[in-house]
Image (tube, grey):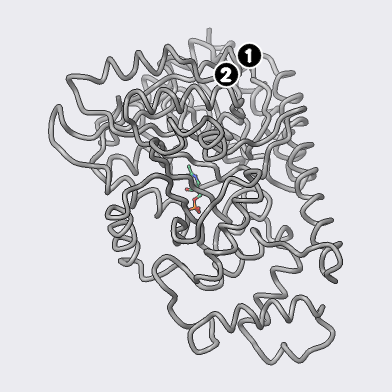
Amino acid sequence: MYSLREDNPMLRGIRVSPQWGLQRRSEQITALLQQVLSVCLFPELLHNDTLPVDVRQRAQRLLGECDGGSVGSYTDSCGLPHVQRSVAEFITGRDGGVPSYPHNIFISAGSQIALKVMLKLLVRGKGVSQTGVLTPQPCPHTLPMLLEEVGAVLVPYQLSEEQGWALEPGELHRALTASRGHCRPRALYISNPGIPTGHVQSRKSIEWVIQFAAEERLFLLVNEVYQDCVYGEGMEFMSYKRVLFEMGQQYSEMVELASFHSISNGIIGECGLRTGYMELVNVDPAVMVFAKTLLCTDISAPVTGQIALEIMVNPPRPGDPSHSKYTQEILTNRITLAQNAQRAWEFLIGLPGVSCQPVTGGIFIYPRLSLPPEAVEQARSDGLEAGVLYSQSLLDEEGVCVGAGCEHGQREDKYHIRLCVLTPSATLEKVLACLGSFHLHFLDQFSQHA
Ligand SMILES: Cc1ncc(COP(=O)(O)O)c(C=O)c1O
């Protein structure tokens, strides 16, 4: 378990890096999204027949859902009912007919706000009764800060790098047992596809986690923001909700679950529009009232973001004038991401002292570095963690920003970096070239010192 206090040697010297590095790509926004948003912001365009008719119809429909017919008005704290309905329909379709209901959908100003709301509801107690959250190592780098902010205890469980970052049943048991006497574990956090590891869980693994959560009465907090970024051969995204319902009533009526998704990540990638949602399953209606109340403190998610969310979950259908272009754009984004992940993996495993598990989903690649003892020693004498020394030198010398593994809670004396591959392929090539020459120089520099 680690802390974010300044005296934590693991975190000393870390600079605040852009949230997701290379993520925002202005060229990635789809024409449909731009067009619908433009019409909603400037309704005179409703009469502009150079815009596709389905764009104008959609904008008119969405404006009709807004108070006063304007995106400048507040919405309900859980979002526009129309968008909640679209999200629920999307989930039902995605999950092979397992029903989703609009009243269980909470639209928020990003998935992280919704996660914070759920954590606040779960946190209670002090000392041995303080809420603990079982958290994967490596985990998303924002999660430890969030847990600390809400007063939850981070209970680490290790993912097995050698097994492609698999979640091993025995490890969850170990982590749970080890936490007893320190805190009271009440929730289990999962990210699938994995952040920053890029692994995708199999149905069997998900079933096992659900059984474990049921036995130990743990609330499942499932980050599924990269669900549309699964590209490993023969792999498909399987939601926790779907697996839960397909495991039968014994589980489907009992295990409490919050699943998070967002327009920030992956194929749409509009993080600046600040909108996401969570779906709550098996949560007591009285608790849902509190979730709604806590979301109220933000009033509502931006209406422009809710419009983008509606497009993400309810894309044009075959026959709509925008269908072919939109589908093509989304497909291109997916193909670029999959090719980038493969290209980065092949490049990185070709470097000396670098190993990397295959990436099958998400937008990050998480290679492991075997750093010379001299570099580790140098970092120690500078008061830094060696991965931080590496990533800072890379930023200073080549202008390439990667995250250091210690931000994600890696095992001691193992070094990783997090590289975002959601970028135009040409940019990725430049980044890899800079990274490659820096890496060789770094190794050379320290072996010369030896
Ligand atoms: C783990 C994780 N998931 C998802 C996101 C995206 O969050 P949001 O939907 O709030 O933009 C972030 C961004 O910080 C994150 O750290």
Count the marks: 2
Residue 433, x across and y down, in percent: 74, 33
Residue 133 sits in quarter? top left
Q: Is residue 407 left or right of residue 91?
A: left
Q: Is residue 397 left or right of residue 55?
A: left
**Residue that label 2 marks:** 369
Front residue (pair 313, 245): 245
Residue 420, x across and y down, in percent: 62, 40
Front residue (pair 89, 114): 89
Front residue (pair 47, 371): 47
Q: Is residue 135 above or below residue 322?
A: above
Q: Is residue 400 above or below residue 9?
A: below
Secondary structure beneath label 2: strand
Count neighbours of disc 1 (C-alpha within 10 A) and say few if under 14, some if 14 to 19, many if 20 or more.
some
Residue drawn at x 42%, y 11% as measured from the top left: 170
Residue drawn at x 29%, y 36% as measured from the top left: 4
Secondary structure beneath label 1: loop
Residue 72, x across and y down, in percent: 49, 83
Residue drawn at x 31%, y 45% as measured from the top left: 119
Q: Residue furthest top?
A: 450
**Residue that label 1 marks:** 353
